[in-house]
Image (spheres, rainbow, N blue to C red):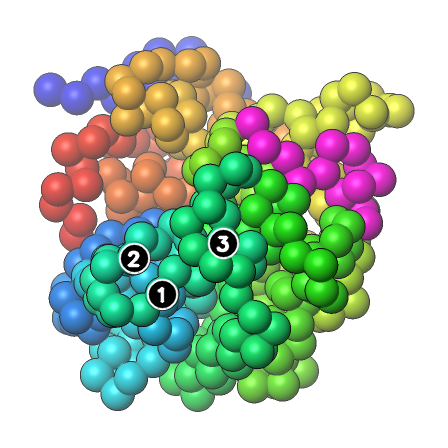
Amino acid sequence: MMRPVFSDESTTMNLDPTPLFRPFSVGTLTVPNRIVMAPMTRSFSPDGVPGDNVAAYYRRRAENEVGLILTEGTLVAHPAAGNDPKVPHFYGSDALAGWQRVVAEVHAGGGRIMPQLWHVGSMRRQGDAPNVDAPVTSPSGLLKPGKKVADAIPASEVEALIRAFAQSAGNAYRLGFDGIEIHGAHGYLIDQFFWSGTNQRDDSFGGGIADRARFAAEIVKACRLATAPDFPIVLRFSQWKQQDFSAKLAETPAELATFLAPLVSAGVDAFHCSTRRFWEPEFPDFAGSPVEQRLNLAGWTRKLTGRPVITVGSIGLDSDFIDTFRSKGAGSASDHLGRLIDMVAADEVDLAAVGRALIADPAWVIKLRQRRFSDFVPFNREALSDLI
């Protein structure tokens, strides 16, 4: 029998989740609460086409009061975008018809939904399906610092990639999605442009930290032109990479401000700031006030840009998501949930993305609102074998 997440009622009796259940608006989107379903790769779409099972999966979370659903990563219209034939596409008539069903089901369930637009870049190996003959795409041909896996792409290919993201954004707008999220985190293509360790270009898409943000900024601009002025565009970014958990794009708040400025100017409406542990402060050695000393990556991003932010990183787990798979515990889930409530109440962050907790327990949000903390179903690896 699985143990409850909070086995000791005394640890949760004083938690008041009310701040997480205030509505929030960005652009044309208003959500009824601050809980977002985080994007999670599922590989349940053979030949890139999401079926009725995918629509039912997302509708179930919508009916259980998730404020906003961010879909699993969906591949943009580029031959080297993916490395898994069961990851859904966001182009082509069959895939788009599948996504049309997903939108209809989520909206019928009372939910709101955005697709996450994705290109894996050099995380793909030559010969990977679905397009085995497509060359690996990378700003400088690097998987990580010092590991060359391909040739650097020419400027003409950079422009083609920008168009691919814009095409998928336009598809999302026409299908009736409530916005889009652009995946610029975790060591994939856009993040490979962000990271100095994988971007050694000497053209206008390389150089200093602001210059390395230009690729994403141009994608945002193109997506805006393909949609509407008030259509919400979210950008997800991270300091850490799958290639290096300790990597940082910005070592200081000043560097982070420099990095974010061109993205704000390009028209990002909200930032989704990915960390492994949302409760950890981002720049404790550079903070001047007690408030700054506790700000995480999302908190600093909101402070520096004034834009809404989504915080994410092991929310609802009693360890970070990496240690969850290694069967290691780390900290108290109740302590972390209390910290999240405080962050939202203090307007440090606006929204909170929950991932694996919603896989294990589709009713997690309802239980949270009703303070049924001891009824939470804990996540474990076995939950991934039956994603419903």
Single out the residue that lies furthest toward the right: 288
Give yes or no for residue 251 being in the magenta stretch.
Answer: yes
Kindly identify the amino acid type of the residue bearing the numbered disc 3.
Gly
Give yes or no for residue 38 being in the magenta stretch.
Answer: no
- Residue 280 occupies quadrant: top right
| Residue carrying label 1 | 135
Kindly identify the amino acid type of the residue bearing the numbered disc 1.
Pro
Give the numbered dot on residue 353: none
Could you say where residue 215 lies in the image, as x and y percent from the top left?
64, 65
Could you say where residue 270 lies in the image, as x and y percent from the top left?
64, 59
What is the C-alpha distance between the residues marked 1 and 3? 11 Å
Placement of the N terminus among the 4 image quadrants: top left
Could you say where residue 358 lies in the image, as x and y percent from the top left?
32, 43
| Residue carrying label 2 | 126
Instruction: Give the SS element for disc 3.
Output: loop
Q: Earlier in the sequence, mark 3 or mark 2?
A: 2
Instruction: Give the residues drawn in magenta, as a range.
Output: 246-259
